[in-house]
Amino acid sequence: MTRVLRPLVLATVTAAGLLMPLATAPAALATTSSPAPECVEYFQSWRYTDVHNGCGDTASVTVEYTNGQWAPCRLIEPGGWATFSGYGTAGNYVTALRTCDPAFVTADSS
């Protein structure tokens, strides 16, 4: 029985080790420590957080939440809007807008 368990444990640990970086990579790669420009504003409700780019330049931003939940990086044209998750029934409020790397921008710019 020991001979059967060792390969199974090794395979499980290897798979977990390979999948763990994938689960944390988007959040680590998308955000920076820079706050979004003041001309980029958010308006939140329980269901959606709408972000408006009032700047003269295109902005790539992501939303930072109370519980650290991952949010995509969105490229917003001047005068444009993007939609993110809202605070939900658990009260996961937006704490900040952050700039993000345009290489990790999500195509959705609704």
Image (cartoon, rainbow, N blue to C red):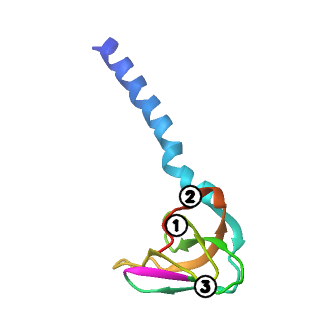
Q: Is residue 6 left or right of residue 94?
A: left
The residue at which mark 1 appears reads as 68
First in sequence: mark 1 vs mark 2 = 2
Furthest-left residue in this view: 1
* SS for callout 3: loop
Residue 12, percent from left and from top: 39, 30
Furthest-top residue in this view: 3
Q: Disc number at residue 27?
A: 2
Residue type of the residue flagged with mark 1:
Gly
Q: Are marks 1 and 2 in contact (CB under 8 Å)?
A: yes
Q: Is residue 31 left or right of residue 46?
A: right
Residue type of the residue flagged with mark 2:
Ala
Residue 73, percent from left and from top: 57, 65
First in sequence: mark 3 vs mark 1 = 1
The residue at which mark 3 appears reads as 79
**How packed is label 2: few (under 14 Cα within 10 Å), some, or many (20 or more)?**
some
**Number of the front mark, 3 or 1:** 3
* SS for callout 1: loop
Q: Which residues are magenta?
A: 47-51
Residue 48, percent from left and from top: 41, 80
**Residue, x 60% and y 55% (percent of image)?**
28
Residue type of the residue flagged with mark 3:
Gly
Label 1, label 2: how many angstroms apart (C-alpha)?
Answer: 9 Å
